[in-house]
Amino acid sequence: MAKKRISRGKFDKLQKLSNDQGVIAALAIDQRGSMKRIMQAAAKKYGKEYSLDMVYEYKELVAQELTKYTSAILIDEELGFKGMKSKSKDSGLILSYEKTGYDADTVGRFPELLPDESLDRILEKGGDAAKVLTYYNPNDKDEINKVKHAFLERLGNEALAADIPVFVEIVTYDDNVPDGKSPEFAKEKPQLVLDSMKEFSKDKYHIDVLKAEIPVNWNYVAGYTKDGVDAVYSQDEVKQIFKDMNELVDRPFIYLSAGVPAETFREELTFAGESGNAYSGILGGRATWLDGVEVYAKDGREALIQWLDTQGKENVEELNDILAKYAKPWYAIYGGLDNIEVFDKDVMTD
């Protein structure tokens, strides 16, 4: 295998974002619009008056307590500015770089970057990487996907100039099957995810880490369905899908929890690992901290800290145990550390 050349800034930061096994065992709490809705609903349920201060404090406490057990945290500055400061000093920092959501009145779900942000500014704020979410359907019209391809090419080139890793989260969709939880969409999902991963593994995008969806809907996997729900995939089919992903991706990829319950995320990661899927970690979000929202809304700050130090910690450590057993170091895809050539480069500055 030819040596992989990686600039020193990117290499050092990828190492900082990883644990001592080279695995990205990261926490994600960069939700913005959905975080407001979740907190508002919890406050209403317990007769409390909702305010944004609740969201600020919640993110602050989650970052403060749970980054003791993670290699990094993904957070947004808009609602997570307190969490940026309260995280463990040993935990790397990934900052969201995209605007939340998309324009529902425009066909295409086009991505946009935060207008007052840049990768140089993220570095100045102590960021070790930037994350950009892009909604993508590989079967969409060319005039839609060409815009997204160009968008991510520009992002990759900005990251090269700033010498900072970029994580790209690909969330698939099909406007013709609007119910993403339906069996109809479940049948499409493996092709959508695998084709998207193949596309964004191309060198022209300069993506350092792909943040991937689990390529099936776990609710429709034989042996894991609820009573009365017909399976869409056999377990052998799912194993093959996980194996196929390895052949399509030539850079580190990690999994997002996508809002599934903690037990489901553990099942997904374990099954992927047992299938030989070469994932390099996770950005675990709501699967680790969601149940704490009601604890906080009902009983306040100290109750949340207690929950985070018990159940929250357990959620994270159970995932860490799975990663220790199955996840591959981020550099394994390149043949290991000995096969990486780290080079110094001049970063563009004013």
Image (cartoon, rainbow, N blue to C red):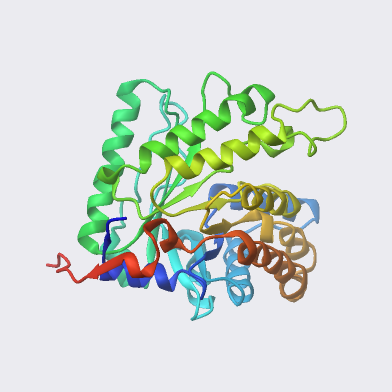
Considering depth in this image, is 29 or 229 the residue closer to the camera?
229
- Report x, y in % for residue 110: 38, 34
Considering depth in this image, is 236 or 194 the residue closer to the camera?
236
**Left-right relation of 39 to 155:** right
- Report x, y in % for residue 204: 25, 43
Picture layout, residue 4 above or below residue 148: below
- Residue 307: quarter of image: bottom right
Given the current orientation, which residue lies at the most extreme front position?
1
Residue pictured at 34% horizontal, 70% vertical: 338
Given the current orientation, which residue lies at the most extreme left position?
350
- How many numbered marks have been drawn onto this rendered protein structure? 0
Residue pictured at 59% horizontal, 47% vertical: 34
Considering depth in this image, is 326 or 102 the residue closer to the camera?
326
Given the current orientation, which residue lies at the most extreme bottom position?
89
Is residue 84 in view from this perspective? yes
**Left-right relation of 87 to 143:** right
**Left-right relation of 40 to 94:** right
Is residue 127 in view from this perspective? no
Picture layout, residue 342 above or below residue 200: below
The image quadrant where one finds the N terminus is bottom left
Picture layout, residue 96 above or below residue 137: below
Residue pictured at 37% horizontal, 69% vertical: 337
- Residue 152: quarter of image: top left
Residue pictured at 57% horizontal, 30% vertical: 189
- Report x, y in % for residue 99: 41, 47
Considering depth in this image, is 139 or 29 the residue closer to the camera?
139
The image quadrant where one finds the C terminus is bottom left
